[in-house]
C-alpha cells in the first residue's frame, strides 16, 4: 500500500528539493507535505 502512495506522492505533490526550498524558511503546509512524503517513503522502503 505504501508503494502505491509513494508513486502517487511523486506524481501529485511538489518536489521542494528541486525548487530549492530552505527547510528553515518553509511554511507549515510545506512542512506537512515534507513530513507526509518522509513517512510514506520510510514505510514503502520497509
Image (spheres, helix red, strand yellow):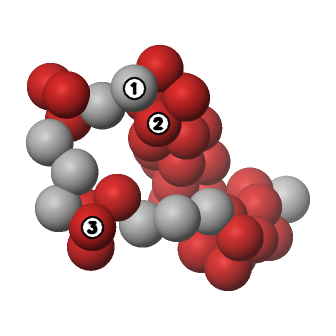
Residue 24, horizontal then vertical, whole percent? 15, 25
Residue 37, horizontal then vertical, whole percent? 54, 48
Q: Where, quadrant-wise, is the N terminus in this rendering?
A: bottom right
Where 1 sits versus 25, above or below? below
Whole-angstrom CA distance, mark 3 to mark 1, is 14 Å
Disc with the residue nearer the chain's start (2 vs 3)? 3
Residue 46 seen: no
Where 6 sits versus 7, above or below? above
Q: Residue furthest top?
A: 28
Residue contact at pointers 2 and 3, CB within 8 angstroms: no
Give the residue drawn at x 71%, y 70%: 12
Where 5 sits versus 18, above or below? above
Q: Secondary structure at mark 1?
A: loop
Residue position for label 2: 30
Nearer to the camera, 21 or 37: 21
Residue 7 seen: yes
Whole-angstrom CA distance, mark 2 to mark 3, is 12 Å
Q: Secondary structure at mark 3?
A: helix
Give the residue drawn at x 47%, y 20%: 28
Residue 27: mark: 1
Residue contact at pointers 1 and 2, CB within 8 angstroms: yes
Q: Is 22 on the left or on the right of 27, as rendered? A: left
Amino acid at each position: 500500500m505504501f508503494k502505491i502512495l509513494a508513486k502517487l506522492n511523486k506524481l501529485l505533490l511538489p518536489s521542494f528539493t528541486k525548487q530549492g526550498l530552505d527547510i528553515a524558511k518553509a511554511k507549515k503546509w510545506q512542512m506537512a507535505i515534507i513530513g507526509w512524503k518522509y513517512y510514506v517513503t520510510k514505510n514503502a522502503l520497509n
